[in-house]
Image: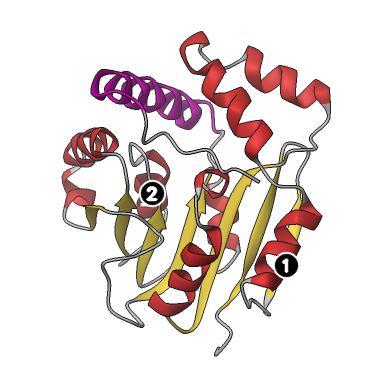
């Protein structure tokens, strides 16, 4: 299965994509479409947490707002996304000093072993070119008993949900959105992937439009 990744975009295309995605995520926050509460309910609500693929930072900043005494590091492969994320963080002085954004690839994370209390990621799983490498890195950087939460689209969502999501997304992002839905996993594919990558303590839950993988490190 070829994973979708946007590293072959031109500099201008990357900037346009990042800016359009920033606008979409801000709109999602306004209408209450972020899955922040689900992340918190999964037990990710304290300590130093890593977000893989934060994009413009909207979800992570929303998580910081709803948790206390927490600190977030965002690992993002697209420099233009990081620019937008830093600008969004700077607008809230209370959150600005609780978040750091780092440019890097999740299949080789620039962090020491046992660096984070938890990891979460939203809508980036389908873009991981080497998913087992990323999943291995998640286990490495988490503290013993650390929790992870990975949400994404599901390839086999019903057409009605797919059409609704596409219709309510800005036209400038619909091409990428369709590609993401094609590249996403089914429940069985996600379970097979995690088992192949050595994961033991996890569940894969289905939503009408996506799936949620959550669990703890193997040594927890």
Q: Is residue 110 above or below residue 22?
A: below
Magenta portion: prevailing SS class:
helix
Report the front residue among 40 and 4.
Answer: 4
Q: Position of residue 197 (x, y in %)?
A: 61, 72
- Using the rendered view, name the quadrant where residue 72 is placed: bottom left
Upstream in sequence: badge 1 or badge 2 = 2
The local crowd at label 2, few if under 14, some if 14 to 19, many if 20 or more residues have their Cα within 10 Å, is many
The local crowd at label 1, few if under 14, some if 14 to 19, many if 20 or more residues have their Cα within 10 Å, is some
Magenta region: 9-32
Question: Which residue is outermost to the bottom?
Answer: 219
Give the CA separation, mark 1 to mark 2. Answer: 22 Å
Q: Secondary structure at mark 1?
A: strand
Q: Position of residue 53 (x, y in %)?
A: 40, 48
**Circle 1 sits on which residue?**
203
Q: Is residue 44 visible?
A: no
**Circle 2 sits on which residue?**
60
Which residue does the image show at 35% across and 26% down from the upper left? 9
Reply yes or no: does residue 21 show up in magenta: yes
């Amino acid at each position: 299965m070829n994973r979708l990744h946007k590293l072959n975009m031109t500099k201008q295309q990357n900037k346009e994509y990042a800016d359009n995605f920033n606008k979409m995520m801000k709109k999602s926050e306004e209408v209450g479409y972020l899955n922040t509460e689900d992340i918190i309910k999964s037990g990710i609500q304290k300590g130093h947490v890593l977000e893989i693929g934060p994009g413009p930072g909207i979800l992570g900043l929303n998580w910081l707002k709803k948790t206390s005494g927490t600190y977030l590091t965002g690992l993002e492969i697209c420099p233009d996304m990081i620019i937008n994320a830093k600008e969004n963080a700077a607008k809230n002085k209370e959150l600005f000093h609780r978040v750091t954004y780092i440019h890097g690839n999740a299949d080789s994370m620039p962090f020491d072993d046992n660096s984070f209390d938890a990891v979460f990621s939203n809508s980036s799983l389908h873009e991981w070119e080497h998913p087992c490498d990323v999943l291995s890195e998640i286990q490495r950087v988490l503290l013993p008993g650390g929790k992870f939460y990975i949400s994404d689209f599901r390839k086999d969502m019903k057409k009605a949900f797919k059409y609704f999501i596409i219709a309510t997304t800005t036209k400038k992002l619909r091409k990428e959105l369709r590609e993401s839905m094609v590249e996403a996993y089914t429940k069985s594919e996600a379970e097979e992937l995690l088992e192949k990558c050595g994961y033991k303590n996890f569940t894969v839950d289905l939503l009408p439009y996506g799936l949620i993988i959550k669990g703890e490190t193997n040594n927890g």
